[in-house]
Image (spheres, grey):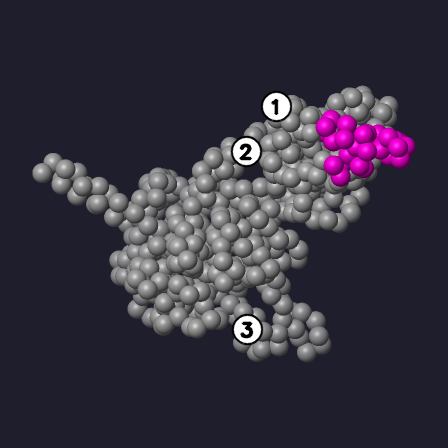
Amino acid sequence: MRIHVLMFIAIVVAGCGRNGDGGKEVARTPSHAGDVWEADKLEDAAAAPATVIAFVNGLHVVVLDGSDVYAGTTRLSTTSESGGRALTLSNGLGAHIVPAGDAMELRFSSGERMTMRKQKRGGK
Amino acid sequence: MTTTTLLRHGRWVAALALVSTAAAPAARAQAVGFDSTAVAAVYHHLTGDSLDLRSAAERSPAVQRATNFDRPDVITAETTRLRSIVANANPAREFVISVNDNISEYDHEHGEFSIGLFQPGYFVPMEAFGQRYQLVFANAENVRAIPMDKASARDFDARLRATGRGVTNEIHFTVTGQGDPAGAVTGEHVIRAQVVSARLLDRQGHVVFTPAVTATPTLKSVAADAFDAGKADIAGLHVGVSATDFAATLERLFGPVKSAPAGRNVFAGFAGTIEMNADGCFTYPGRRYNPRPGAVCVTAYADKAGIVRSIRIERLFKGFDQEVFRKALTQKYGPVAAARNGATFALGWGPIIDTALVYDRSGPHTALTAHYIVESDYTLTGGSDRNDVRLVLNLVDAAWAAKAAK
């Protein structure tokens, strides 16, 4: 009986898809919950470095749903920090998403920053 | 006196690396301490990169000086000596090299000057065992900058102008492995080194600046763990997820998705495709409605069980410094395993995969590749009116592919 309980727990933990990177796991993006935010497509030269880093890390288009950020099939846990949400990326790189009027500002710990706007697409 | 040259991406640049007995104290110290054969020996000892000892012996001065009668015996003796040098090389040995370097103009945005040799793509060429080597510094980015407030920078800049911005860069380093972790220097015999300490000297030997040296903990930690394509993601997207979940994710984030059976000319293990704006990132010269920066395209392949095994995501950008992309990639994925450089470049991580699965057959042929591609369009007068860059990330579940190919 105890073995079965342990096996069940093991299966549940494995099913969560944790990949060993703190605050990060494989997940399907929710179909309706939260809002889709995307890098400003005007992409002025000053924002290009931040947009490139965001693209590499999947933050160029995300769903923000409460304290979770969905970047592709990755769910990132965030913590509340300075009026925004802080998240940890790979190898010590961090990011901070801060409200800026109708938009959001994505600030990387390496200094780059860019504007994100709520996606306008038929009913999504 | 030995003279070497500082190169970037295979092109000549102005600075010369001098290994000499010139008057400057640093140069004298270097002449005593630097031994390119010892550096190369540590490299071969550490990496196992093959070395044709007999050929190296045949090119050695001892053999060149020998008479025809004595040459076979001298070759044998020299081969034995070189083998002993490599076998007994000490990886902990610290070397010193002095390089004629230069310091950039002041970067007002970042409040810093940059040291020429420590910028991406620069290396010090050297010769040993009768062949050429490229010496790159893995932690160059950590010692590249000379941060300075504007007031101090004005005086510093005046000193630099007086010497044509030239300095002697005295570098203490150890050899740590093979290849440029940033993938900017490619070719045979790329020696990876770690700067232990450095100082910049003027022509009189006075210290101009001493960089604060830090190791490369980020790259080291990644190198310690083997790259796992099954766990890696590209732009947040993973292989190994169900095609249904993958399609739903694309639909939510980007827009309409098309799912269809895989075509005939794809890898045999693929059964279906999932596409989002698949052809919407290509620029066709002269076409009226070419894609604009911000366009995103995704193509993925699933196996018979409906599991995603290969993903390609592309995004179009206005032109930007390619080093931004390179830095973001090495920050995320660690040292580059393979690279192809040029106006467009590609970097690779992970194991080699079947060529039917790679994005670009000219390489790299690794499980994960990243491509920087300049897109050109043309005006009626023949000039290009675009400066767009298409970034492509391609990831293949290498472990699955190896089984599927059997």
Which image quarter is the N terminus of chain B in? top right
Nearer to us: label 3 or label 2: 2
Are the residues under badges 2 and 1 in a single subunit? yes
Q: CA distance from mark 3 to mark 1?
A: 55 Å
Nearer to us: label 2 or label 1: 1
Q: Earlier in the sequence, mark 3 or mark 1?
A: 1
Within 10 Å of disc 3 (Cα), the crowding (few <14, some 14-19, many 20+) is some
Q: Disc 2 sits on a residue from what chain? A: B
Q: Disc 3 sits on a residue from what chain? A: B
Q: Which residues are magenta?
A: B54-82
Where residue B377 sits in the image (x, y, percent)? 63, 71
Q: CA distance from mark 2 to mark 1?
A: 17 Å
Residue nearest the observer in this picture, B11 or A103: B11
Q: Residue at x 75, y 49 (%)?
A: B11
Q: Earlier in the sequence, mark 3 or mark 2?
A: 2
- Does residue A93 appear to the left or right of A81 in the view shown? right
Q: Earlier in the sequence, mark 2 or mark 1?
A: 1
Q: Residue at x 44, y 70 (%)?
A: B277
Nearer to us: label 3 or label 1: 1
Q: Which mark is residue B216?
A: 2
Q: CA distance from mark 3 to mark 2?
A: 42 Å
Q: Which mark is residue B92?
A: 1
Asked whether A33 falls inside the magenta stretch, the response is no
- List the residue tagged with mark 3: B290
Three-letter amino acid code of the residue under disc 3: Asn
Residue nearest the observer in this picture, B192 or B378: B192
Secondary structure type for disc 3: loop
Within 10 Å of disc 2 (Cα), the crowding (few <14, some 14-19, many 20+) is some
Are the residues under badges 3 and 1 in a single subunit? yes
Are circles 3 and 2 on residues that touch, CB within 8 Å?
Answer: no
Q: Residue at x 85, y 25 (%)?
A: B21
